[in-house]
Image (cartoon, rainbow, N blue to C red):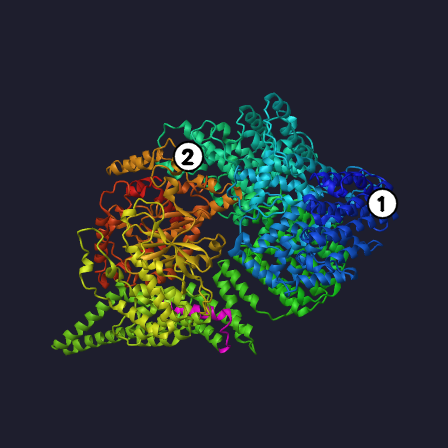
Amino acid sequence: MQYLTKCCKSTSSLVTLLTSRQNNIQRVLLALSSRLSQCYTSNERGRALLIYRLFVKLLMQELGSGLGGSWAFVVRSAIHTICHEIRKLRLSGGSGGAAGRTSADGEMFDICCDVLECVFSAALQSCAEELARHLSAITAVLVDVVKQNTAQSQKARSLLELLVVQNTDKLAGAIALLDPFPDGSAFSQLEATHSAIKYADGALTLREELELFLKTRAKCRLEGLVHVAEQLTAKRRELARLVLQCEEQQSQSVVVKLLCALLGLCRSNVEEARECRSCEAIEERSSACRSETTAERLEHVGAVRQAVAKCLGCIGVADLSILVLQSQRIPDSVELPGNLGNLEGFSSTEFQRNTAIFQCLNTYLTDPEVRVISAASTILQELLATASGQKFAATYKELTDDHLFNHLYPFRCKKKAPRAEVVKPDEDTFLSFVNAEVVWTPNSSHTDWIIGLVCNLIKSTAVTDELLCRLVPICKAKPKFCELVFPFLIHDILLLENVTFKAVISQQVRNFFAGAYGVVSSSRSTTPALLDCTGGAHEPVYKNKRSVRVLLDTIQYLRMQRRPAAGRPHSTEWDNNFWLDVDYLHLARAAHFCSAFFMSILFTEIWCDVRATEEAASEAHKQKSSQDFLLSQLDHVSTSSSSAEDDQDCTVPSLLLESYRAVGDPDGVYGCVVGRLTNPAIRVNMYEFEGKWEQTLGMHDLLKAQDPSRSAVGIVGALQHAGLEHLLSNYLERNEPGSCAALLEAQYASAWKSLGRWTLEEAPPSRDMGFNQVLYGSLLALREGEEKGVRLLLAAGRSSAVDELVHNGLEATKSVYPTLAKLQCLGELESAVGVVCSGARVCELLERWRQSDKFCLAEFDYVEPVLALRSCVLSILAEKGKNREEVRTFTIDCLERISSLARESGHLQVAEKSMFRIKELENIWHTNMLSWRLEEADVYWARKEPETALCFLKSLVQDLKSVPNVSSSTAALYAKALCLYGDWLATTHFKHPCVIMEEYLEKAVECVDINRLHGHPVAVDAYMMLARYADNQYQHIVDYTKSSTYEAKQALVRDNQQSADMIRLMDKNQSISNRTLIILEKQTVLDQREDAEMLKQKERFLVKSIDNYIKVLRAGDEHDLSIFRLISLWFCNSENASVNALISKGLEAVPSYKFLLLMYQLAARMSTKQQRCRLFQPTLDGFIRRTVLDHPHHTLPIILALANSNKDTELFKPAAKGRKSTASKSVVQEEDRVLAAKNMLSSLKSRGQSELIGSMEELSDAFIRLAYSDASSFKKVTTPINIPKDQPLLKLRNLHSVAMPTLELEMDKSSKYENIVHIVRFEPTFKLAGGLNLPKILTCIGSDGQKRRQLVKARDDLRQDAVMEQVFGIVNKLLARQAETKKRRMHIRQYKVMPLSQRSGLLEWCEGTMPLGAYLIGDDHKSGAHHKYRPDDWTAVMCRTLMTKSDSGQKYANFLKACSNFQPVFRHFFLEAFPDPALWYERRLAYTRSMATNSIVGYILGLGDRHVQNILIDCNTAEVVHIDLGIAFEQGKILPTPETVPFRLTSDLIDGMGVTGTEGVFRRCCEKTMEVMRSSLETILTILEVLLYDPLYAWNLTPLKAYCVQRKRDDVQADASSGDLLDITDKASSFASCSSEGDVNKMAERVLLRLRQKLQGVEDGVPLSIAGQVGHLIQEARDPKNLSLLYPGWQPYI
């Protein structure tokens, strides 16, 4: 080369000459690499390597010059080429390793190290950042060499030290991200340096460790996985905290991300193992072969698999609180830029496609196989020479700061790309390449199939994209790349809109799926057979999951692309489903086969929609009947199918049912079985789903009797789940499992759980072993102390579990939980090996188990195997005599927990069995533990055996009472037992209330106080139990004194007294009169004594309940809602001196934040007048003052709004010309409470709050002034409007002490409120939100830099909206406390409402939402989704006109007619916004649950005026948000046109719920919500009682206000001026304020009575069950007769 340089006329070096063209260096390096790969002898390889070294050294000498722009490519290429060569050298020669290494290998290794050292030195001087990117890959190779402990190890270590130890300043960031180095003296200095850099700022938390791993997971070494497992094991407490955060953070939780990353490693590991095993059938080359041997690759894959499995086992069945784990399948190498806006010349889809292609090709440039590098190089050269390639490169560099094109610089073409050649598609060529069955469904491997299919598509001339048509070389080399580009190719072909091309591809795809998924029996027995197909190498591709998934992903990719209109008037998102003419039912079955359950559900629903559309077209002449309103789309499809298609349609519910079960939807299943439970197979399926194992066993017995040849798996499973282990064991002994894997598993499970049946046949460890077989063998080996045998079996079990994970699918959390439970069992068993065989400490093992329990999912089916295994391990430890006392205690605790979980999940036989096991152990061990006896009583109470339960509990109470030297735990157990016993006696009414309270509940509280258990959870329970019981007795007396019975008795007493008085006057017959008088006087004395005793008891119960409610609030936060009952009792007895004294003294110790829930109601009671009890008002003012001082940002707006009640009147100007407001003429008479509020503000100003109050007063005044500013001239303006310069709002800036008013500020118990988000300024423009009063939308900029929109309203009383939002917040607390509603994440969406005065206020703008009406019919009532998807239907205006003109006799018929011509379309919202199947399902589920929760809570609260503009849909979460809450507590029934439905459940809202309609999720969630509401009856009534008796609450809906409510919706035909309507509103408000307190109380009592009836299930005077009540409400809400009577503006046809 030096000679060549001298021969050149130029003075430049050879390297400089090579850089004259940007690809010269790349071509030379590729040629040298090819030469290396083609050498088969050591001498040839040595010479080739020397040449390579020489050229690289020449390049490194001029690396600083940039090598013409190729510096990054050269560094990366040299590093990866040499690293691949080192791997080959290390593994060459026999079996690899030191023994097989020759001297020639050593010499070549020295050359490789020389090259690396040269590259490292040059790169450290010129481009250390680029070297840092490859540090992980370098380390992985050299660490393996050092671990071999050969002569070459020293050189490898020297290179590592050069990078890690000697250049820490330049590579510190990359070194910190490295995986830990292995143990051993060879790595001690390296690990010390790595640790010093990584932990320079101190030890990392578990979160930080996991985040580091997630950054580098694609490059992690085995040591990295081992380190993660160690961290997860050692930091269980931190892991528990991270798991608890999953509920709030969802998919962004670090634990969820870790789990997804590990599952991704599982998938790639299984695929790599499959490739290795397929290579085992091919004879290896001679010992001189340079490639890695299959055996060593499998060994490495197996080690990685074990490490991944251990990490997953450490996580176990953690409660992740999410439904979806992974959705789209994106290659790990593809990193899509986040900013895809402003793509000139590209669609977003095209840019993402090209990004994926170029990033994959860039990755292939470092592939171990030179043929792949060569193909990628050729393709890149061609792609970047095209106009499209150059345009993409320029756009990519503009959008990202990625280094992609630094590495691709040699392939860039400096010349302007020539005009793209127009490829003319030829149909004949296309048919010859593509229209052949052998191309689409050959009997070959997946690899051959995908390569052949993709190459044929590209060669067919139908691919016209100038990038895609050049990909054949790389497709032949990389099957995975074929999988990536296959959807792109199909999409590109279909964009041509060639009828022939589409028909051929459609036909071939249909044939592919029809073969295996076209005909499926409707019985359940055949469905699993379909799912159990493993897709082996010799099976057809349509049975290979990988091949099927490629086509399914292609269909899904096409669905996400915009389809051209192709002659249609317009294209919609629905049309995107039909790029190809395929049968979506076949696709759904195929997706089910691939464990893509979300996709299966989506495709099934698309098929149902298509089917329903076809049927509707065939019956277009038929008008919709009333029965059609009660049928779901699934019912329509099933009932309308012809007899020839019945079998096919019967599989649709079964397919949906299996998919719902697989994704873990607890409610969707029920929507598939409505009306189909006559089918025994479906009935058995439902029994199993609901855990009704007795019925399941009975059904299987009947089916087995009918068909003796039927498999016994069902019977065995039922016996197993029912906990009938002895019967199961006997059954299996008489019926040998034979070759049935399920029965064999059941036999092994029964054996190891029986703790003594160790007689089954053992098998050598293998991947085919079942999980229970592994556990059986491992436990047996553990008993015998065979550590090696245990570890071999555990390794086999982990390997099998990873295969199972991938086979079952990784999309849904539900599908991975069973395997995670198995891996947790294996991990815990392995941790016990060290204790049994190596002498590790038992206490550490038990502590690790205790920490794991803190974040485990509390579902019996997943936790029971773990706990059962622990009990077995503990039994073995007990046998070995390991730490007997602690082991025995933990064993009983473990069995007690099994019983508790089993009892709560309904597995009562399992619970009772655990109790019997404890008794057996107690008889042997005599531990004298008593806590399990409480659980035993609970079990029998759950079995509905109250006498037995009370007997056990009484015995426990007596034994605890006699325990000497009572410890705190014993005292707590005694108090708990007393509470429970008292509660059960009260429930069964076995004893007098006074006895119950005195003998049990008061003694429980006394026990807590004497033993100072105030910080113990039992203290709160004891106080609460006594408080509730005393309260109930007090309430019974109050109710009795109000009853007709008591009134009749008092009348009799009065009659007796009158009779006695008359006798005294008539003294003619003294003897008779004396006797009668004595009798009457005695009766009167008895009656008076009884009344006095009753009043005494009433006072006693009242004081006792108040005293203990105060103790509850002081003891903890678990029952914070009891503050409502406490305040209610106080307000009801505000004249009682003893009550006021108790409240005044007791509540001083209650934290002030507990009063925040009641600030509206407390403030409403403020007064300047003297009350009958002088202590009441000072006490109230003191609580309010203390709460305001502690939490000013939450409370001051309430006080300020009350003080500003009449601010509107002071500032209000006449709205219409020529007229003056009547309010402005009169002198404002301040109410008493307004004056009290102003006095409170003055008092607070003197206590250091003057600055904050002053700022808030300025802000409030500014809001009110802007709200009342005239904007009528801008009524039709949609652009931003300038705020008048005289508005004080523009002058408000940097209000440091004022929190953002519409941002929910988290309550700070310490009252510090540091770093709050305060107001910086307001933008100088506003928009009008539309509507009658023209509310204004402002934009407020906070100190966090975020802009938040706010809605300021005038002439509207927002106090009721604020109160309703308060009620919603309390209901959310109730829903969050119940397990069933909490796991469904059921809640009501809230928004902040801040009243500013009596008739103005501020609201949080619900970002990312839109009214349902805006989506469905548009703002003009003529567009929207209805016009988009059903342009031939009537418009909403036409329907409304028809209903408006209908008289009472025509409404029903006309309503049916309108509905027939106005079909629902809301399902398309979810297909538009969430095209990904998993996201689509998750969002639609959230919508349905949100609808159910809002419907039931809205019904209970009597929420009315639910037209389509008052319900918003969140475009991100799909939850509904109800706004404008001014009509509540059934005020809608007294509107001019009364509301006749309990809640809005019209056809469009039902349409959004899917093919099952109101069945399944909606109905079940309604029932769960109703269950919570009814179980919280007293709590809800107490809360609402306080609210409803609020003196500020505007009860009376006057005729004027009612007229205004319905008139404001009449946007289409309204002809009244806005000024008239505003005056009507003002008059209505003035009229409303004149209500007397007596009227308010009567209305409140009436509402409370109706609320009680609703919460007791009384409908139309008939008590109903929860299911019956919900069914009745749904029927009423959907009844077309009811809907037809509604006000036309309500638009019931939408």
Q: Residue furthest top?
A: 428
Q: Which residues are magenta?
A: 1010-1032
Q: Is residue 104 left or right of residue 1258?
A: right
* Number of residue marks: 2
Give whichever of 353, 560 is nearer the camera. Answer: 353
Q: Name the residue carrying label 2.
A: 1429
Quarter of the picture containing the N terminus is top right
- For the C terminus, the quadrant is top left
Closest to the observer, 619 or 1185:
1185
The picture places residue 916, in percent across and down from the top left corner, at: 60, 61
**Label 1: element kind:** loop
Q: Which mark is residue 94?
A: 1
Instruction: Say whether residue 578 is left or right of residue 210.
Output: left
1397 or 1503: nearer the viewer = 1397
Residue 549 in sight from this viewpoint: yes
Q: Amino acid at mark 1?
A: Gly
